[in-house]
Image (cartoon, rainbow, N blue to C red):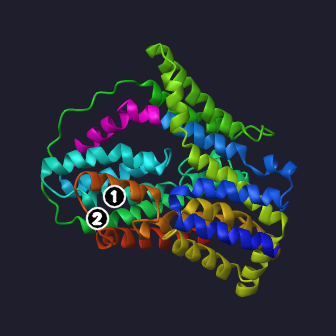
Amino acid sequence: MYFALGLFLVTYVLLLIFGKYRAYIAACSALLFVIFRIIPLGQVPGAIDWNVLMMIAGTMGTVVLFIESKMPALLADIIMEHVPNIKWAVVALALFAGIISAFVDNVATVLMVAPVALALSKKLKISPVSVIISIAVSSNLQGAATLVGDTTSILLGGHANMNFMDFFVFQGKPGIFWVVQVGAIASAAVLLFYFRKYKQPVNSSKRTEVTDYVPTILLSGTVVLLIIVSFIPNKPAVSNGIICVSLAVIGFARKAFKEHSMTPFVQFFKEMDGETLLLLASLFVIIGGITEAGVIDAISQLFVKIAGDNLFVIYTLILWASVFFSAFIDNIPYVATMLPVVGGIASLMGVEPYILYFGLLIGATLGGNFTPIGASANITGIGILRKEGYTVSNQDFMKIGVPFSLVAVCSGYLLIWLIWS
């Protein structure tokens, strides 16, 4: 057990230090877990959650086609037509990014909405820094709202066997979707206060023309089919993954047919982000190894020993510790590691784990908004600004990120406890 724990800790430190190579570090570590027989080779395929990997791969592909179709830009244009001034334009763009992000990866959302924010800022002669930061933090918030909103949500769904509808209504109670929406409304008030002096009027421009409506149909179809399949009992474990991959393949096959070329299929495999998939697959093996070695049980017992049998203390510890750690480290490996720990804690305490799972998801998802490096969407937004010649300091980011996140986290913290305790 101690050797497995040591190897795991070394892996985590290397992931933090060498962020660009984290997929390969995790893969090497997973290989060592197999070589040293911490996890038997025969258990490796079972340790990997193929449904999660397929969902991520398929959704990434469909989102690329959705962006190419220019539908997000059209939706943003329509929003701009219905706002009176810059203050409301920024808040509307942030909320729009959040809605998109509930169904599309956070980074992809920022890439969709940021060009609209840049164009608006140039037209109105204001700095786009605060505008794009607002879009990034809003997209991070809504990533926890649905099963397909973020990798962390997909990880939770796979681990806890939760389907698409469980994020809306779970065991007869409001799901985490509604908790996130309350946080979104509360944090929107923070943005309204921050941009209170931006009262210049907005002049709407010519609407963007959508080049292809099929990707919108495919993305909508993905959501609809995930809802339908959530009501089917005894379905295959990879049902959601098959849906996401199949619709992405249909989209790229159609594109290949129209272009009379196989290039779109090459694009499909490129857009699947092999490094993220390799990282996740490797993490599943590593977590399977430390579980097999008894490390997860030992960590769970330590948590219970620290907090006693007090569910509120455990819940508070998990949520706020997740906020702290996710402010500085990537929340994907963190959540992947902590899900079995949280399940182990609940088992030791003899309680259902869902309140702890939801606390983990809220803390890990929103904690990334406290710092510029806490979430990939933040890094993407800052990178876009850097290309435009703008420098973003920690202070610039945290002036929006910290109050935005505190309001959203506190509302989620209280609501989850009131609903699920």
Q: Which residue is mark 2?
A: 392
Compared across the picture, whether 11 is left or right of 379 comes to right
Mark 2 → mark 1, Cα distance in angstroms: 7 Å
Q: Earlier in the sequence, mark 2 or mark 1?
A: 1
Residue at 74%, 55% in the rendered image? 31
Amino acid at circle 2: Val
Residue 201, horizontal then vertical, whole percent:
13, 51
Say which of 349 and 320 sits in front. 320
Q: Is residue 13 visible?
A: yes
Total count of labels: 2
Mark 1 neighbour density, 10 Å: few (under 14) some (14–19) many (20 or more):
many
Q: Which residue is mark 1?
A: 382
Magenta-span inclusion, residue 411: no
Residue at 51%, 57% in the rendered image? 20
Residue at 26%, 68% in the rendered image? 194
Say which of 156 and 80 sits in front. 156
Is residue 143 shown above or below 55? below
**Majority secondary structure in the magenta region:** helix
Q: Are marks 2 and 1 in contact (CB under 8 Å)?
A: yes
Residue at 69%, 53% in the rendered image? 282
Q: Is residue 138 visible?
A: no
Does dot 1 land on a helix, a strand or a loop? helix
Report the disc number at residue 414.
none
Q: For the magenta stretch, what is the residue range?
A: 64-84
